[in-house]
Image (cartoon, rainbow, N blue to C red):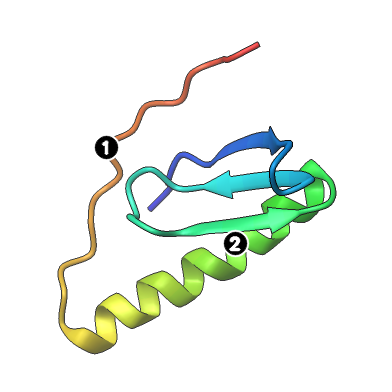
Amino acid sequence: MKYLIEIFWSDEDSGYIALVPDLPGCSAWGATPEEATREIQDAMTAWLEACQQSGEPIPKPAAKARHVA
C-alpha cells in the first residue's frame, strides 16, 4: 500500500518533519527533506509491524496526494 507522506519545515524542531496522516502518531525528523523521507520509511515499517503484532487492523490509505507550495 502507498501512503501519503507530508514533509514540512519546523522552526520549533529546527528540521523537517515527515508524517503519515493515515497512520496516527507515525512521524519522523530529518535535517533535510531527504533524511526525513528515509526516516519516515523506517517509522512506517515499525508502525505497520506493531499493528500486525498487536492484531490491530492496518488502515487503508485514505489521504489523497496534493501539491502544496
Q: Quadrant of residue 16?
A: top right
Q: Is residue 40 above or below residue 51?
A: above
Q: Residue at x 61, y 58 (%)?
A: 28
Q: Residue at x 67, y 62 (%)?
A: 39
Which quarter of the rendering shows the C terminus? top right
Q: Amino acid at mark 1?
A: Ala
Q: Nearer the viewer, residue 22 or 10?
A: 10
**Residue labelled with disc 2:** 41
Horizontal and vertical percent for residue 23? 34, 55
Q: Nearer the viewer, residue 10 or 52?
A: 10
**Residue labelled with disc 1:** 62
Q: Sequence order check: which comes first, mark 2 or mark 1? A: 2
Q: Is residue 1 above or below residue 39?
A: above
At mark 2, the secondary structure is helix
Q: Is residue 19 above or below residue 9?
A: below
Q: Residue at x 52, y 42 (%)?
A: 5
Q: How far is the residue under mark 2 from the one under mark 1?
A: 18 Å
Q: Is residue 57 left or right of residue 40?
A: left
